[in-house]
């Protein structure tokens, strides 16, 4: 079967051209041919067709074979060209081969033509395949380069001698070297420790993906933490190591923030639990010391001792409140707060407290929004921060208090994963003090951590501010440099609606007790129960006691006549204080119930079977309570009950 062959014949003698065609047909080729004899004819033929073979006479009338070869190659045609001539000499043939001809055959020896054509067609096919492979390789390499440049991680290759080859754009951004600077450089320029021995290039296809924590070195000499995955690849036919490098500075910062948050949460849970036991103890101590104080002669030495003990007990209560503030479990009386009014009303106190050697300045702009916060806790936080600033300025300085409306976008309060977003009010306290050392700055909000000398601080001031801010739905940010002072920014959420802003409040007057009112005191701690009985008894109330909810309920079901139930929330026996309150309302609708607790979350650490929040039954008296607080809230509850119709919380039984 004949093989089609597109052949261009450059020959000025027709008989010679027919001779070549006959030889091709003898070799089982079916030639599709065109004969040209001039430069213009050759140019047109090359432009018009895609030829498999060119057969060219060397000597032409007015046009030489060397001219034809030069035109073919100049026009970018790679078709095999074989000279077929009767006059070409050895020297000219060698020159033609050097110029790009594939072979030459003498006309008087055409038996060499067919083998030469077969060989050149095979080699041309191989060259075409190689060219196609090169083109595919170039496309693949281009794609790989695009992927390398798009990769967010730094990628480089290192040969067996430890020299850098591939180096992508992310590597340039990470390390700072330009590609031309780093090409062929030792890998130790970027990885001071070099490539681990067990990850160096050994053979292609080895295990890949193992991650190694290392230090990378930037162009400026600084070192950064990196995570490197090594693998083996082939580059330029030789085994090489590929390193995929990730900058983990931000990840380490986030991990440290998470560890810090978890540590503070654990400490918060611990302090929140301990606060309950402390509050019970302090209730007994403070309550009994108040009772003893009232029995002792004014001015006597023993009364003075009782007063000192009572003052110490109250300081213990304040410490417990600070622990609860840090754990974000204190009870907040949240309301709309006029920050400017609050600061203005506190400035005189700050000046007296800080002393004449510290100048107090304020910047309170008009148009400030109202904050949603507990005004008493805001005042306490402001005072704590001012006292810290005073301690940082032993030789005097300047304290500045500023307020501002701010709109945070998720990175304005500490650059944490849970950073704030939305409308907030900022209360900033800055000083010109000694500042805080960089290694101490990350720990300043930890409870009991202090940079002050022993005995000069509890280490709870800043942790209380932190807990209060977070519990309020805000945050706190601190900036400081040694010798350049400190700025603490407290962010509080903006209050919505038209709630009247409060700048502070005074203590209410104690109402007179209802004469002969009957109170059922329910408390599982015997000492606390005895203290409450003594305080209430001293005010003329008639009292009955019960150690738990089921016992109290049985008394009421048996017909015990009372005017008020005073009960702890967290009690054994399967019935909480809120459960008892619900049961009391079923028996005696409208009977007042006053709840008390040493916990801060109102549940006593357990679920309430009634499904009612403690606040649904009215104000809750928090331990440790003083006699005046107890009597005031009892009188209020009795007075409200006398003035109001029967009341049940929504959803109550």
Image: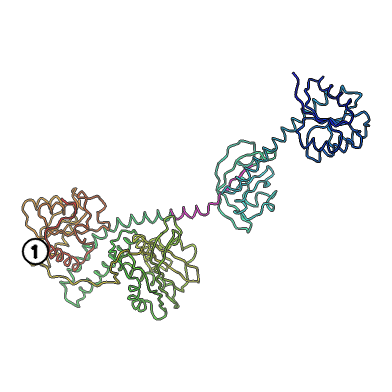
Quadrant where the N terminus sits is top right
Percent coordinates x, y for residue 42 in the rendering: 83, 36
Horizontal relation, residue 70 to residue 479: left or right: right
> Quarter-wise, where is residue 277 in the image?
bottom left
Q: Is residue 520 left or right of residue 356?
A: left
Q: Nearer the viewer, residue 347 or 463?
A: 347
The picture quadrant where one finds residue 234 is top right
Q: Position of residue 443 (x, y in %)?
A: 44, 61
Q: Quadrant of residue 396?
A: bottom left
Q: Where does the magenta region start and end?
A: 241-258
Q: Residue at x 43, y 71 (%)?
A: 430
Nearest the viewer among 480 and 277 is 480
Residue 548 visible in the displayed image: no
Q: Going by the image, does 551 lie left or right of 251?
A: left
* Residue sitting at x 80%, y 37%: 44
In the rendered image, residue 388 lying in the magenta stretch gets the answer no
Answer few, some or many: residues within 10 Å of disc 1's Cα (few below 14, many 20 plus, some between 14 and 19): some
The image shows residue 230, relative to residue 471, as above or below, that is above
**Vertical arrangement, residue 125 with respect to residue 137, above or below:** above
List the residue tagged with mark 1.
517
Residue found farthest to the bottom: 356
SS class, disc 1: loop
**Residue 343 position in % (x across, y down):** 35, 73
Q: Is residue 253 magenta?
A: yes
Q: Position of residue 121 (x, y in %)?
A: 78, 28
Q: Is residue 310 visible?
A: yes
User: Residue 567 versus residue 375: which sits nearer the camera?
Assistant: 375
């Amino acid at each position: 079967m004949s093989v089609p062959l597109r052949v261009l014949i450059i020959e000025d003698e027709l008989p010679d051209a027919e001779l070549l065609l006959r030889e091709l047909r003898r070799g089982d080729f079916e030639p599709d041919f065109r004969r040209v004899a001039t430069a213009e004819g050759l140019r047109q033929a090359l432009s018009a067709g895609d030829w498999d073979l060119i057969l060219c006479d060397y000597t032409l009338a007015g046009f030489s074979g060397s001219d034809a070869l030069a035109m073919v190659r100049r026009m970018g045609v790679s078709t095999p060209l074989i000279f077929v001539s009767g006059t070409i000499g050895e020297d000219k043939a060698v020159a033609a081969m050097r110029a790009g001809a594939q072979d030459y055959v003498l006309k008087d020896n055409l038996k060499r033509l067919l083998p030469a054509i077969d060989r050149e067609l095979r080699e041309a096919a191989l060259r075409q395949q190689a060219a196609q492979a090169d083109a595919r390789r170039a496309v693949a390499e281009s794609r790989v380069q695009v992927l390398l440049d798009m990769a967010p991680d730094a990628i480089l290759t290192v040969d067996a001698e430890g020299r850098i080859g591939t180096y992508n754009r992310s590597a340039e951004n990470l390390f700072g070297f330009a590609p031309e600077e780093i090409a062929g450089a030792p890998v130790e320029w970027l990885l001071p420790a070099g490539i681990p021995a067990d990850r160096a290039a050994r053979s292609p296809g080895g295990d890949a993906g193992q991650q190694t924590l290392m230090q990378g070195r930037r162009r400026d000499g600084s070192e950064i933490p990196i995570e490197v995955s090594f693998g083996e690849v082939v580059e330029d036919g030789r085994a090489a190591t590929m390193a995929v490098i990730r900058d983990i500075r931000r990840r380490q910062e986030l991990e440290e923030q998470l560890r810090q948050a978890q540590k503070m949460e654990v400490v918060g849970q611990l302090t929140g639990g301990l606060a309950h036991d402390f509050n019970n103890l302090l209730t007994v101590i403070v309550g009994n010391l108040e009772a003893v104080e009232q029995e002792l002669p004014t001015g006597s030495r023993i009364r003075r001792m009782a007063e000192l003990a009572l003052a110490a007990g109250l300081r213990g209560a304040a410490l417990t409140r600070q622990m609860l503030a840090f754990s974000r479990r204190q009870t907040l009386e949240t309301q709309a707060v006029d920050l400017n009014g609050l600061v203005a009303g506190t400035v005189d106190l700050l000046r007296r407290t800080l002393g004449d050697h510290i100048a107090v300045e304020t910047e309170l702009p008009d148009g400030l929004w109202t904050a949603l916060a507990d005004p008493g806790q805001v005042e306490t936080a402001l005072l704590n921060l001012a006292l810290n600033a005073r301690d940082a300025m032993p030789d005097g300085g300047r304290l500045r208090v500023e307020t501002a409306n701010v709109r945070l976008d998720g990175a304005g309060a500490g650059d944490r994963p849970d950073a704030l977003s939305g409308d907030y009010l900022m209360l900033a306290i800055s000083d010109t003090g000694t500042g805080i050392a960089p290694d101490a700055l990350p720990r300043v909000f930890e409870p009991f951590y202090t940079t002050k000398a022993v005995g000069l601080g509890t280490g709870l001031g800043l942790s209380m501010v932190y807990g209060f801010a977070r519990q309020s739905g805000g945050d706190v940010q601190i900036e400081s440099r040694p010798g350049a002072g400190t700025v603490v920014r407290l962010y509080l959420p903006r209050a919505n609606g038209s709630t009247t802003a409060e700048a502070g409040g005074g203590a209410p007057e104690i109402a007179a007790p209802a004469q002969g009112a009957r109170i059922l005191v329910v408390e599982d701690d015997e000492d606390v129960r005895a203290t409450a009985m003594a305080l209430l008894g001293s005010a003329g109330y008639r009292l009955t006691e019960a150690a738990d909810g089921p016992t109290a309920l049985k008394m009421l079901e048996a017909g015990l006549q009372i005017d008020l139930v005073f009960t702890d929330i967290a009690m054994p026996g399967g019935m909480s204080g809120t459960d008892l309150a619900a049961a009391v309302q079923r028996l005696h609708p409208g009977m007042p119930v006053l709840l008390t607790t040493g916990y801060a979350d109102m549940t006593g650490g357990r679920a309430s079977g009634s499904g009612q929040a403690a606040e649904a039954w009215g104000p809750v008296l928090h331990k440790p309570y003083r006699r005046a607080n107890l009597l005031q809230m009892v009188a209020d509850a009795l007075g409200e009950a006398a003035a109001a119709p029967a009341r049940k919380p929504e959803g109550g039984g």
